[in-house]
Image (spheres, grey):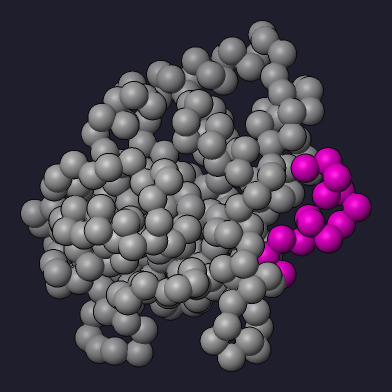
Amino acid sequence: MREWWRGLAGELAGLVLPVDCAGCGAAGETLCGVCRSALSGAGAGPVRPSPSPAGLPAVYAAVAYREAVRAVVLAHKERGALPLAGALGAALAAAVRTGGVGGVGEGEVALVPVPSAPHRVRARGHDPARRIALAASARLRREGVPARVTPVLRLRRAVADQAGLGASERRENLAGALVARPGAGRVTAGAARIVIVDDLVTTGSTLVEAARALRAAGIGRPDGAAPGAVLLAAVVAAPADAFVRPGAGGGSGRSRADPVRNSNRAKNL
């Protein structure tokens, strides 16, 4: 209820106060057409951090994390720009679809948001990953994909702020920090695919820990194994050099994930 009121207040304020684009600062709207296009997910694809940590499921991202995209993600996450959740959710939905979700007869999709620490939820007034997951789920359902949000993970101990930590430090910081809630297996039962979702991947440590916690509860399997639901991950954004090039033979690098960068509109971002 608190999140709903805060979102309504933000939308009403936009009716009477001047607004600037969260991505580029252009006056007149919360998210301009150019920046909305940058979040379309047209270049969504597989990503793999380098080095790729053990236990990382297949990960798909909608767009490269830079410039306008970075500004929009942070405005939603840290500054409570809740009306941006729709565009971010659309991007996340594109990443989920890129992971092979949405074929005819493939079954239900369970989106599992990475949980925020309770004190951060209180400080921000909302849970960013969960809010984006809800928007993505709604978008997928409109596209005919039976998707639902299943917030079955929780933090069982305090963790340090990840900002400024290296890959190994992040792994140590998060090791054993997440656990599946009681009844998580029942809640996700019937889903053909379990998709861990977040706004951003950098080193992959958070997704590794989320996957570990789900597997420890008997939820999810690698694609091609049997039985059980396929476990994968989808995010709004990833570093540009994490996108896997088509035909790269296991390497990673810049791919088609950032079409705006190569257009004449990039200068606006």
Q: Is residue 15 left or right of residue 162?
A: right
Asked if residue 3 is positioned above or below residue 131 in the image, the reply reads above
Q: Is residue 148 left or right of residue 245?
A: left
Instruction: Give the residues in magenta.
Output: 256-269
What's the residue at 36%, 72% (across, down)? Answer: 53
Which quadrant is the N terminus positioned in?
top left
Q: Is residue 265 magenta?
A: yes
In the image, farthest residue toward the right: 264
* Residue 163 x, y percent position in the rendering: 41, 44
What's the residue at 91%, 52% (across, down)? Answer: 264
Number of marks in picture: 0
What's the residue at 47%, 49% (across, down)? Answer: 199
What's the residue at 54%, 28% (across, down)? Answer: 81
Which quadrant is the C terminus positioned in?
top right
* Residue 243 x, y percent position in the rendering: 60, 70
In the image, farthest residue toward the left: 182
